[in-house]
Amino acid sequence: MPGAVISFNSVDSSLSSLKNCQSYINTGMDIATNVALDLVESFNDAEDVNSMEEVMLEYAAMDRELNHYMEAIEETVNQIKQEKPENIPDLKCLVKEKFTALESKNSDSDLEKNEKYIYFKDQLKEMRKQFRLKSDNNDNDAIEQIDEDIAVTQSQVNFICPITQVEMKKPVRNKVCGHSYEQDAILKIIQTRKQQKKKVRCPKIGCSHDDVKESDLVQDEALKRAIDSQNKQSWSTL
């Protein structure tokens, strides 16, 4: 006896709506990250920055819940397609069971594995490093001019792309080795080597990472802000 004919059009529509919700969550996390970087750049209290981290964790929790719900729906649909039951099952009940099972495995450490939260922490760390250096240089009025010049020069070296050998405008950071490059320059190398079916070694001298992938590159907002800040400071002294 053939199984019941079930239309999944409404299910597909629901999944599409859920993915739209996920894009709103991602946008919210991007905004929270930028606000946190603004706070560090403006030398605000750590408490203000920590509040943005709490916001990020709340977003990560929503993202996890949404992912579990979509996973539960997809598993239910696949199960029904495979089993082809004679009677139309209670989809809502099946989805709820699978969703509850997924949620029961939750732990706080899951939230810290969220890709955008990891990016948030990484950029916050880099931002604090860049602007703490700037703050220390500005606050120490007793430092001799030659030492100031050395400090600025060392800072500016980090702004130079290891590929183009000029100051970066759109830096991207390699999540694997931590080095940054001009976006267009590294993508061009990756594309060229891909056509040659060869791996890309990190262009930073001394780096042993020999398989740079486009998927490992993220926007280095902290470095871009540090470069922009340095340039503004240079123009203001002219």
Image (spheres, rainbow, N blue to C red):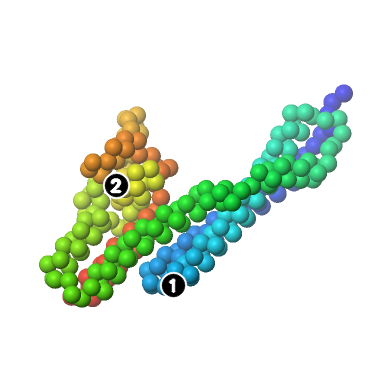
Amino acid residing under circle 2: Ala
Q: Quadrant of residue 170?
A: bottom left
Labelled disc at residue 45:
1
- Rendered location of residue 75, percent (x, y): 70, 37
Q: 22 left or right of 196?
A: right
The residue positioned 71% from the left and 42% from the top of the image is 101
Q: Secondary structure at mark 2?
A: helix
142 w.r.t. 126: above or below? below
Q: CA distance from mark 1 to mark 2?
A: 37 Å
- Depth check: give the residue in front, 85 or 118: 118
- Depth check: give the residue in front, 9 or 105: 105
Q: 95 left or right of 17?
A: right
- Name the mark nearer the viewer: 1 or 2: 1
Amino acid residing under circle 1: Asp
Q: Secondary structure at mark 1?
A: loop
The residue pinned by badge 2 equals: 185
* Quadrant including the C terminus: bottom left
- Rendered location of residue 24, percent (x, y): 58, 58
* Quadrant including the N terminus: top right
